[in-house]
Amino acid sequence: MNFSQDANKIFDQVVCDYHKTDDIYAQISNPYAPQTIESVLYLKNWIDSVQWHLEDVIRNPEIDPVEALKIKRWIDKSNQERTDLVEMIDSYFLEKYQNVCVKQDAVINTESPAWAIDRLSILALKIYHMRQEVERKDVAADHISACQKKLDVLLEQREDLSSAIDQLISDIENGNRYMKVYKQMKMYNDPNLNPVLYAKK
């Protein structure tokens, strides 16, 4: 089985697990052994699933301002956790292929495997929620038709992205491409780099 097939299976599993309660406060129950790539992928999509719904909550025009600030802080923390997990996934690939003999004419990719996998995780959520719209019974036929077209595109996008990820991993494994990972170095969460925060010191 290709890496993307494993990842898509885990992402779909997480989305279904999350929606058993559909509760942003629900506790994760990761079924995979700690420190495995499967466990990391499960956690990655769980965080994405919670954040997807936090983004819905904060857009409620009647939300209490105090609650909105709490959710915004939560989203900021979630974004940092997502970035950390993406870098962890890239570390997995760097370690796995550290002994590959890179060919002289090897080229670098525009993004690392993990950032492409990050998009695959979000696609699982888009597909789930667009399918929900297609299955709604309280909307007009034109809404369902429009959403079905969008769902078809999302499914095609997942197929194309999965294929591209597997090709990238294969190219890295065979020395045709090489990985070069740049840490994201987010500044807004760092009290030493965010001028609003360090001005308070």
Image (cartoon, helix red, strand yellow):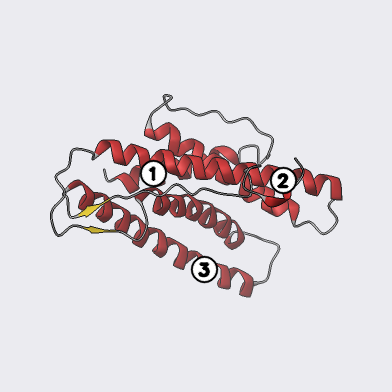
Mark 3 secondary-structure assignment: helix
User: At x 32% / y 54%, what residue is drawn?
Assistant: 165
Q: Nearer the viewer, mark 2 or mark 3?
A: 2
Q: Judge left or right: residue 183 versus residue 139.
A: left
Q: Judge left or right: residue 123 versus residue 137.
A: left
Q: Residues within 10 Å of mark 1 (few under 14, many from 20)?
A: many
Return the disc, 2 or 3, that comes first in the chain's sequence.
Answer: 3
Mark 1 secondary-structure assignment: helix
Q: Nearer the viewer, mark 1 or mark 2?
A: 2
According to the picture, the residue beneath numbered tag 1 turns out to be 7
According to the picture, the residue beneath numbered tag 3 turns out to be 150
Q: Tell me where residue 194 appears, x and y as whole percent.
A: 66, 49
Query: From this viewpoint, is residue 15 visible?
Result: no
Indicate the quadrant where residue 100 lies. top left
The span from disc 1 to disc 2 (Cα, nearest Å) is 38 Å
Q: Judge left or right: residue 128 versus residue 21.
A: left
Mark 2 secondary-structure assignment: helix
Q: Is residue 93 above or below residue 163?
A: above
From the image, which quarter does the N terminus lie in?
top left
Return the disc, 1 or 3, that comes first in the chain's sequence.
Answer: 1
Query: From this viewpoint, is residue 124 visible?
Result: yes
According to the picture, the residue beneath numbered tag 2 turns out to be 197
Q: Label 2 amino acid?
A: Leu
The span from disc 2 to disc 3 (Cα, nearest Å) is 42 Å
Q: Is residue 154 above or below residue 49?
A: below
Q: Label 1 amino acid?
A: Ala
Q: Residues within 10 Å of mark 2 (few under 14, many from 20)?
A: few
